[in-house]
Amino acid sequence: SEHNVLHAVAARRDPAVARAQGEKLAIELGTSETIKLEGASVIELGCGHGLPGIAAAFSGAGAVTFADYNPEVLHTLTVPNVQANTPDIATAGLVSKKPVFRYLGGDWSHLHRFIPLHSADLVLAAETIYSTAAYPKHVAILRHCLKPPHGTALIAAKSYYFGVGGGTRLFAAAVEEDGKSQTLNPKTSFLI
């Protein structure tokens, strides 16, 4: 009963904007034969435009929570994008039931107040591991959210962020160093 901590979707080229990583993660979700989302509870951290969360909705997720540090991003980008892209998702026969959408704004250290313990089958994130200073919050929210024993986090990121120092290897090391975790498996795999 292992718990998947990190599947880092590392692009062959480092895209210039976070949206490109979100698109890559959305494509990975849409084409994956191993990720089953029918009725799943999904959380997208650092959602921006919400593309991976929207892809999860089209893949049958029962609930998608979009979380971003900046509530203004949710109001101006995420909510309009979700509404524009999913209005008839169930009635068009694309999924059996329209997912429930939630939106949370604020620092990750406070999200545990609004997300039930071990409630997510899948946590998605793109371009969220650039700052090593944020790793403790990131690991803590993953530990809080993911359902044991099979909850999974898919994180699209660059292998190294010049100028700030974060990246996939350092984040994987931070997960491994998280000694408090009973629900996170420190083993990592990288999908390219």
Image (cartoon, rainbow, N blue to C red):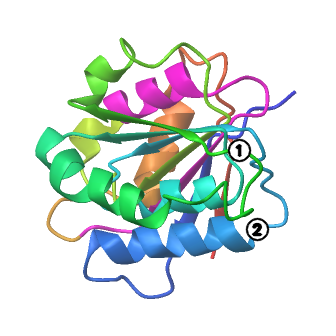
Identify the mark at residue 32; answer none if there is no mark.
2
**What secondary structure is found at the residue carrying circle 2?**
loop
Residue 61 coordinates in the image, percent (x, y):
67, 45
Can residue 142 be found in the magenta stretch? yes
Closer to the camera, 83 or 25? 83
Can residue 62 be found in the magenta stretch? no
Query: Based on the displayed image, in which of its 4 quarters is residue 78 positioned?
Result: bottom left
Closer to the camera, 152 or 190? 152
Residue 118 coordinates in the image, percent (x, y):
61, 18
Q: Amino acid at mark 2?
A: Ser
Q: Amino acid at mark 1?
A: Lys
The residue located at (73%, 23%) in the rendering is 148
Q: Quadrant of the C terminus?
A: bottom right
Closer to the camera, 74 or 172? 74
The residue located at (66%, 54%) in the rendering is 90
Measure how far apart labels 1 and 2 are at the Cα level: 21 Å
Query: Based on the displayed image, in which of its 4 quarters is residue 82 positioned?
Result: bottom left
Counting labels gives: 2
Identify the mark at residue 80; answer none if there is no mark.
none
What is the magenta range? 136-161
Q: Is residue 129 visible?
A: no
Identify the mark at residue 97; answer none if there is no mark.
1
Q: Seen from this angle, which residue lies furthest bottom? A: 13
Q: Quadrant of the N terminus?
A: top right
Between disc 1 and disc 2, the foreground one is: 1
